[in-house]
Amino acid sequence: MILQALHDYYQRKADDPDPGRRLPTFGLEEKEIPFIIELARDGRPLGIVDTRQGEGQKKLAQRYLVPQGVKRASGIAANLLWDTAEYALGIGARGNPERVARQHEAFRKRIHNLPETASNDEGIKALEAFYLEHGASALAQDPAWPEILEKNPNITFRLQGDGCLICQRPAIRRHGGQDDADGETKALRRCLITGNIAPVARLHTAIKGVWGAQSSGANIVSFNKDAFTSFNKEQGDNAPVSAAAAFAYTTALNHLLDRGSRQRIQVGDASTVFWAQKQDDEAENGFAAVFGERDDPDARSEQIRALLESVHSGKFGGGRGETPFYVLGLAPNAARIAVRFWHAAPLHEIAERIRQWFEDLRIARAPHDPEYPSLFHLLRACAVQGKADNIPPNLGGDIMRAILSGAPFPASWLNAAVQRSRAEQRVNYPRAAAIKACLNRLYMHQNSFHDKEISPMLDPANTNPAYRLGRLFATLEKIQEEANPGINATIRERYYGAASTTPVSVFTALLRLKNHHLAKIRPLYPGRVIHFERLLGEIISSLDDFPKSLNLPKQGLFAIGYYHQRQDFFSKPESGASPKPGNETPKTPQEESK
């Protein structure tokens, strides 16, 4: 299913009417080529062109369509008309001249084995003349030569005055570079992707761009050692995929994972790509905005707002809504790639899941908090020291799977948010949003878990003891703050952990302490004291006793109650509305004396 969807995506992109968005045809690939050797018609080298742009270590080479590269590990196998300096020029500074000589011989052999229609091309004749009469030594005085000798970069050739590389000339392009580099005849088998009888790809092109995988690429389909000989099958025959289909799915996946791709995001350790079966830029760009990071938060918010508006207005209904949408998460696993998650669903279902995701997260917030927090922001807020390296490897993928399927969020996410709140004695906006989302999903699937769904704002009607205790703790902290203006540390720093896990051990002492604090406030702000006493009475009215302990979900409810009450204390009344009774800002002693 995954390979078929990628194969279909390749067909869609290969037929794109915009040449700039079109994927290469079978037998070609896009490759960064830092250096191009210019040749005269008689084979004389005219110089080395540096295609890179940028400064220092950030120099990026220009990309060119070239014959598809061969797959190689430690063996010797040459690409057609482009390769490293060791292959293309027979030079190297790595101290193994015999191996370099064999590499260069393999490069020359592929050119020699071209069919007559290609070998008679003017560009091929010039290249052969270069090797026979001049060679690499003729380039030794070029300014780029020391760097080429040291770094062994990719190199190719171009005729003077030509607008294309030699490997792009019509005779070579018609050949397509589809010769057998290893000289083997490919067996004919039924392709598992297309169903057609065709030559089987013995090895599949490496996939690059998966975060944490080998820089040279890894495989999503691979055959290695004794595994490929099961049932007396040759390598590649145990999962036969035609060479054309293998090219299609690997080209599509490498395109989606490309450094500049707008259809990839990082979810924990999973490099995640997504696409629609039919072109739908709004859906694909919207998905990237929902789960990815953007340099411009305002533009990201506008994209998400537009996407949610499209969901509400029914734009994803009808035939458009039935278009399949795919999400694939890939994680590194040595030389192979592990599929962390795979989700395929109609576009209207994906859009509804995204709407539900933001509804789950919606909670009271400060003006500077993002309206639509990214998944990475939420994960980092629940990690030790707020570092991305400390995010559990599977957590992002598990959350993404729950978002797309509508299932409960993983208990490990709730545990991480509650544990960090307790360890740091702080319930911030992303942690509160994560806890609310986890608890409400549990309520949706197990409505006996707690009394009612958690609302985004303070809910005085919620009588759950854990929620009420969180509100009570926030109120006692607020009383302490107003009794001691400018205090550096409140009861939160000392008691939050115990209050949220073993309430009976601390609340009796905290309620006695609050009498002392209220006594300090009463002479200056008697109305404020009355307000607090009423609020305490309302909160405690439904509490029969203080529980001995709270389990993990109830600790989450405690955190939400605390967060809601704190947000309510500092929320500003709407313009033109009168302040809540007893909630006026206390006057300073100087103001009182006037």
Image (cartoon, rainbow, N blue to C red):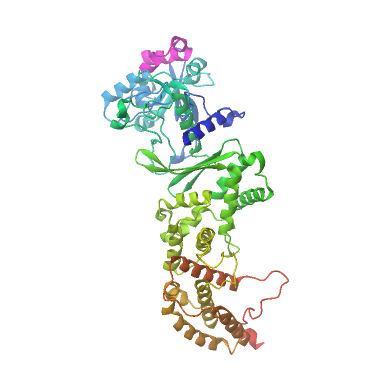
* Magenta-drawn stretch contains 20: no
Is residue 517 placed above or below 60 in the rendered structure? below
Is 122 a magenta residue?
yes
Q: Position of residue 510 (x, y in %)?
A: 47, 82
- Residue at image point 46% right, 40% down: 58
> Which of the image's four quarters has the C terminus?
bottom right
Residue under the point 30% across and 28% down: 229
Percent position of residue 199, x then y: 42, 21
Q: Which residues are magenta?
A: 108-134
Residue 564 in percent (x, y) is at 56, 69
Q: Position of residue 319 (x, y in %)?
A: 65, 38
Q: Nearer the viewer, residue 487 or 382?
A: 382
Q: Going 36% across and 42% down the picture, which residue do you hit? A: 333
The majority secondary structure of the magenta stretch comes to: helix
**Nearer to us in this view, 64 or 301:** 301
Q: Is residue 67 visible?
A: no
Picture quadrant where residue 96 is located? top left
556 in relation to 176, above or below:
below
| Front one among 235 and 433 | 235
Q: Is residue 114 visible?
A: yes
